[in-house]
Image (cartoon, helix red, strand yellow):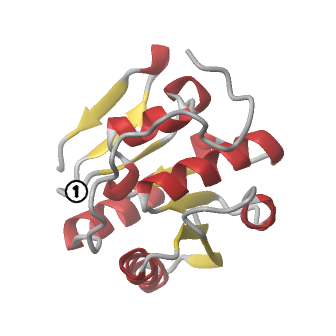
Amino acid sequence: MEPLTSPLLRRAHPAAQPETVITEAEVTALVALARAQGAQTIAAGSGRDPLALTSVHTVVQAWERAGGVCVLELDWPETAASWLRQATRFAEAEPDLWIMLGPPLGWAQMTRRLLWSTPWQPARTLLTGAVSDRRTLDLVGLHNLPGIGGVTSDGDTWHLGPDDHIVTAPRT
C-alpha cells in the first residue's frame, strides 16, 4: 500500500483507456444515484479533453433537467505542476455531491491533490465510467477513497465498501 505523499504520480502508470463520450445509460444512472443520495446540488469536474468536456456538459444538462442545481462546472489539465488551483475551487464549491469524469491520469492526479490539500470527501463523490476502472482507482489507492461510488458505461452502479472492496449493483 503506497502512502499518499504527493499528488503527483511518481511511478509508472497503466495505459489509460481511450476516452469515450458518456452513454445515455451512464447519465441516467448517475442522475438517479445522485437523487437517491438526496443531492440537490452538484459540482461537476472533468479533464480538458474534448470528449470529457462534452460528457460533463451532458451530465450537467441532465442534472438540471431533473431539477438539480450545478454550483460549479470545472475542468483541469491532464498534466500540471500541482492542480492546487483547480482542487481548491472544486472543493470550495461545497455541493451535496461532486461528480468527476476522466481522462483517467488527470483525474487520478487531481484526486490526489484534492486528498492532499482540501476537505473534499470521496464518500460525497460519484464517478463516471471513464474513471470507474479498477486500474484508474488504483492510481489513487482504494484506501484513499473510502465510500466513493459511481456508474459504469452500462449504467451499473458501484461503491467502495468496507475493506476497500468494490461493490457492484446491476441496473434496476
User: Callout 1: 10 Å neighbours few (<14), some, many (20+)?
Assistant: many
The image position of residue 133, as x and y in percent, is 32, 43
The image position of residue 78, as x and y in percent, is 54, 64
39 vs 6, nearest the viewer:
6
Left or right, 85 with respect to 161, comes to: right
108 vs 29, nearest the viewer:
108
Residue found at x 31% / y 66%: 19
Q: SS at mark 1?
A: loop
- Relative to residue 42, is residue 59 depicted above or below? below
- Relative to residue 46, is residue 111 depicted above or below? above
Image quadrant of residue 160? top left
Residue found at x 81% / y 48%: 118
Residue that numbered label 1 is attached to: 155
Quarter of the image that includes the N terminus: top right
Residue found at x 28% / y 54%: 17
Image quadrant of residue 149? top left
